[in-house]
Image (cartoon, grey):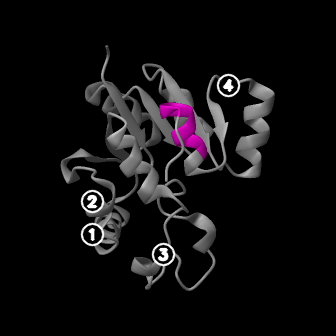
């Protein structure tokens, strides 16, 4: 049986975008207080328990990369999810996610941007997670092969056939 490897974007998939206009915005001075997407910690832990190796793949600049690593540590992300810190990958452009996924053998990928998923031709299972209205409308009209998902429990149900606790 082929290995199960889950790739996960960070912004909007792990770090909640609901804070973007609040004083806890990830792009403001209180970025460490930015909340996580509901259920992400438990569901990533459950994915690992279901046999998935989990990788984070994030497109961002150098400053956001630093802040992301600080946020992950501050939130005790690795301890809470079981994700290995060596499986965190950064790139500077969206198309660069594709070779990272290929190199890591990623079989499933979760992102909140449809244009990213369109680059991931080597990934078998794609999930469009809580997209903005424009991406959701484009997803419906394009008949893209990805699946639209609205929550982390829904992702886990789709990939592992079981809800996270």
Q: For this rendering, which residue is in front, 27 or 32? A: 32
Count of number-bearing discs: 4
| Mark linked to residue 78 | 2
- Mark 4 or 1, nearer chain start: 1
Q: Earlier in the sequence, mark 4 or mark 2?
A: 2
Q: Principal SS element in the magenta part?
A: helix
The earlier-in-sequence mark between 2 and 3 is 3
Identified at 45% across, 30% down, the residue is: 108
Q: Range of the magenta residues?
A: 154-161
| Residue corresponding to mark 3 | 34
Instruction: Please state if 63 lies on the left or on the right of 18 as rendered.
Output: left
Q: Secondary structure at mark 4?
A: loop
Residue 36 in the image: above or below residue 127:
below
Provide residue 82's location: percent of width, then percent of height: 27, 53
The mark found on residue 73 in the picture is 1
Q: CA distance from mark 2 to mark 3?
A: 17 Å
Q: Which mark is residue 144?
A: 4
Report, in whole angstroms, how far the alpha carbon at label 4 lies from the one at label 3: 31 Å
Marks 2 and 1: CB-CB under 8 Å? yes
Residue drawn at (60%, 43%), measured in percent from left and top? 154
Q: Residue at x 59, y 74 (%)?
A: 19
Q: Residues within 10 Å of mark 4 (few under 14, many from 20)?
A: some
Instruction: Please identify, in this view, whether the residue under mark 2 or under mark 1 is nearer the observer.
Output: 2
- Residue 147 belongs to magenta span: no
- Secondary structure at badge 2 equals helix
């Amino acid at each position: 049986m082929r290995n199960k490897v889950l790739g996960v974007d960070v912004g909007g998939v792990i770090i909640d975008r609901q804070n973007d206009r609040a004083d806890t915005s990830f792009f403001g001075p209180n970025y460490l207080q930015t909340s996580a997407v509901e259920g992400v910690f438990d569901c990533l832990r459950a994915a690992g328990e279901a046999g998935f190796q989990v990788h984070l793949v994030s497109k961002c600049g150098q400053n956001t990369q630093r802040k992301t690593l600080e946020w992950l540590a501050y939130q005790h992300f690795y301890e809470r999810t079981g994700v290995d810190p060596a499986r965190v990958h950064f790139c500077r452009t969206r198309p660069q996610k594709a070779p990272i996924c290929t190199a890591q053998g990623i079989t499933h990928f979760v992102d909140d941007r449809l244009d990213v998923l369109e680059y991931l031709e080597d990934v078998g299972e794609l999930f469009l997670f809580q997209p903005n209205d424009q991406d959701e409308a484009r997803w419906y009209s394009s008949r893209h092969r990805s699946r639209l998902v609205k929550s982390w429990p829904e992702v886990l149900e789709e990939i592992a056939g079981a809800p996270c606790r």
